[in-house]
Image: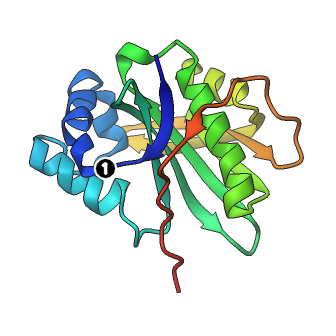
Amino acid sequence: MTTVLRSWRVDDADALRAAVAESPDLEAQLPDLPLHDRDGCATAIRTVLAGQDAPYLNLAIVDDGLAVGNVGISSIDRRHETAWISYWMTCRLRGRGTTAKAVASAAEWVYLELDLFRLELGHRVNNPASCAVAIRAGFVVEGLERAKLRYGSQRYDVETHARLRTDRAPETPLLQLEDIVLPREQG
């Protein structure tokens, strides 16, 4: 089984649709994307997930040729050399360590290719699996943001983590990265 990180492609539309169908919790995390059919998923990939004009980058986690997850790099701040990392994985591949490998790999790549110093992430406190991913990928717990996220009518506390370029690298094995298309610089 080969797992890599790469830029999203329009031909990943069926895989994205299958991921959303299998993991309904993804729709809450991707609420502004038209993910109800193949054409909508293709549009979402073209305009958001692989959009070169966006100030963020999304990398598909690809397992044996099939896109099964995402690592997002957003809120890129060149002045302070920081960014925000987010991630999701289809239900059937959760719990295997693949997401932690993908996040650790993306972090190493960001330090080298985007020359950033600090990466931050957060997860709902009711999601211990996401916390485990963050810790295995080398992110240190920094604090709690009360009632930060709202999904529907419910608010969630968020535990924040960060990883510095100077932190000791985690022991998590890294994935290969291939065919990464960088977003165009804004401004």
In the image, 81 versus 68, the foreground residue is 68
User: What residue sits right under mark 1 in the picture?
Assistant: 9
Residue at (61, 52) in percent of width and height: 84
Describe residue 6's horizontal placement relative to residue 24 as left or right.
Answer: right
Could you say whether the residue bearing mark 1 is in a helix, strand or loop? loop
| The quadrant where residue 35 appears | top left
- Tell me residue 61's x, y (percent): 45, 34
User: Three-letter amino acid code at disc 1?
Assistant: Arg
- Residue 152: tell me if it is visible: no
Furthest-bottom residue in view?
A: 187
Describe residue 115's horizontal placement relative to residue 54 as left or right.
Answer: right
Describe residue 40's horizontal placement relative to residue 151 as left or right.
Answer: left
Circle 1 crowding by C-alpha within 10 Å: few under 14, some 14–19, many from 20: some
In the image, 67 versus 131, the foreground residue is 67
Residue at (67, 62) in percent of width and height: 114
In the image, 53 versus 149, the foreground residue is 53
Residue at (48, 74) in percent of width and height: 184
Colour scheme of the picture: rainbow
- Residue 135: tell me if it is visible: yes
- Tell me residue 5's x, y (percent): 50, 39
The count of marks equals 1
Residue at (36, 48) in percent of width and height: 8
- Tell me residue 2's x, y (percent): 48, 23
Residue 101 vs 54, above or below: the answer is above
- Tell me residue 140's x, y (percent): 79, 34
